[in-house]
Amino acid sequence: MLLEWLNIDFSVAKWIEAHEIMDLGCFSFWSRTDHELSLVCPTALLPKDAEVREDGWCCFRIVGQMEFSMVGILAKISACLAEREISIFAVSTFDTDYVFIKKEKSHGAQVALEALGYSFVEKM
């Protein structure tokens, strides 16, 4: 299975108070629950009014469209990285999964996943 690094510095942020979801015009993930509003986006585009933020994330995605009947892919990646004490923040879309890790862990993550049989395509 192919994985692809995204050549973007990401931040994760949240708001507890009411906040409008805005179109950042780019790669971003918004999620709203009854407790918070969260955003994952390029660090350079993170709104300045975030109540809490954490910078320093990078991301890879599973290449290609994944059918909903495919099971265990994210679990296998997560378990591999957990064995090496690399925590993840995962986001799934209709087509695929995105795995966010801290930038300083990216090399170790790639080495671990390649040892498990995954291949990485060039960063976009």
Image (cartoon, helix red, strand yellow):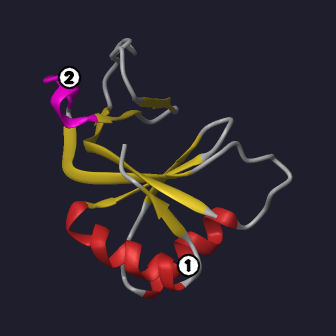
The number of numbered badges drawn on the structure is 2
Q: Does 84 appear in magenta?
A: no
Closest to the camera, between mark 1 and mark 2, is 1
Q: Taking 21 as reference, is 105 above or below it?
A: below
Point 41% across, 34% down: residue: 36
Q: Taking 48 as reference, is 98 above or below it?
A: below
Where residue 83 sits in the image (x, y, percent)? 46, 87
Q: Pick whichever, 104 or 124, lies toward us.
A: 124
Where residue 96 sits in the image (x, y, percent)? 63, 45
Of the 4 image quadrants, the one containing the C terminus is top left
Mark linked to residue 10: none
Q: Taking 124 as reference, is 111 above or below it?
A: below
Q: Residues within 10 Å of mark 1 (few under 14, many from 20)?
A: few
Q: Give the residue at mark 2.
A: 47
Q: Residues within 10 Å of mark 2 (few under 14, many from 20)?
A: few
Where residue 89 sits in the image (x, y, percent)? 43, 56
Point 53% across, 68% down: residue: 119
Q: Give the residue at mark 1.
A: 79
Amino acid bearing label 2: Pro
Q: Which residue appears farthest toward the front when viewing the image?
A: 122
Q: Secondary structure at mark 1?
A: helix
Q: Does 45 appear in magenta?
A: yes
Provide the residue span drawn in magenta.
Answer: 42-50
Amino acid bearing label 1: Ala
Q: Secondary structure at mark 2?
A: loop
Classify residue 94 by image quadrant. top right
Point 39% across, 86% down: residue: 84
Q: Pick whichever, 78 or 37, lies toward us.
A: 78
